[in-house]
Image (tube, rainbow, N blue to C red):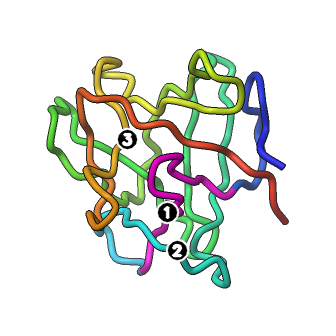
Amino acid sequence: MSVQGIVQTGLYIITNVATSGYATLADGNIASALTQTTDDGNDDIKWTVTKLSSGKYTVAGLVFANYASASQSPSSGDTVKSSASNYQWIIKQSNTAGQYLISPIDNDSLYWSFSSQTANNVKLSDTADYWTFTRTS
């Protein structure tokens, strides 16, 4: 079941509402792009989401323990990539319960996005894409 309200620290599957694709990190290389998959049989779709005391979040892949990150001056079209260093995100529930926007703290007018059902990389966009967070183990 997808969470509603404030996302708490835990292990989640992060799913794009429009495409039903799961955010995944397919390898452990630094600077690899986060991608979309429909394969729910792998642990690489699981993310450790940590709520910080500031109310911001870090998002790290379970399998490779790399963090989802953006550049220091993110702009629309940038790919969300993996990093060995933690990176903070804003995770905010939209007007629809259980659907969230994910934004870099350096530019909260950008959002995680798949540009289409066939786009593979998670990119930052000024057009909001909605995501669900489903607790897992």
User: What residue is pinned by disc 2?
Assistant: 38
Left or right of 129, for residue 136: right
Pair 1/3: label in front = 1
Identify the residue at image location x=74%, y=51%. 134
Identified by mark 3, the residue type is: Trp
Q: Earlier in the sequence, mark 1 or mark 3?
A: 1
Q: CA distance from mark 3 to mark 2?
A: 17 Å
Work out whether residue 42 or residue 131 is closer to the camera in this orientation and state it: 131
Instruction: Using the numbered discs, state the Cα–Cα distance from disc 1 to disc 2 in whole angstroms.
Output: 5 Å
Marks 3, 2: nearer the viewer: 2
Identify which residue is drawn at 34% across, 61% down: 117
Q: Is residue 20 rendered magenta in the image? A: yes
| SS at circle 2 | loop
The answer to whether the residue labelled 1 contacts the one labelled 2, judged by CB atoms less than 8 Å apart, is yes
Residue type at the position of mark 1: Gly
66 displayed left or right of 70: right
Left or right of residue 19: residue 2: right
Q: Residue at x 22, y 33 (%)?
A: 72
Helix, strand or loop at label 1? It is loop
Residue 43 magenta-highlighted: no
| Range covered by the magenta-colored residues | 13-26
Q: Residues within 10 Å of mark 1 (few under 14, many from 20)?
A: many
Residue 112 tag number? 3
Residue under circle 1?
Answer: 21
User: How far across and down, in percent of the image, does residue 39 sit?
Assistant: 57, 80
Describe the element under mark 3 as helix, strand or loop: strand
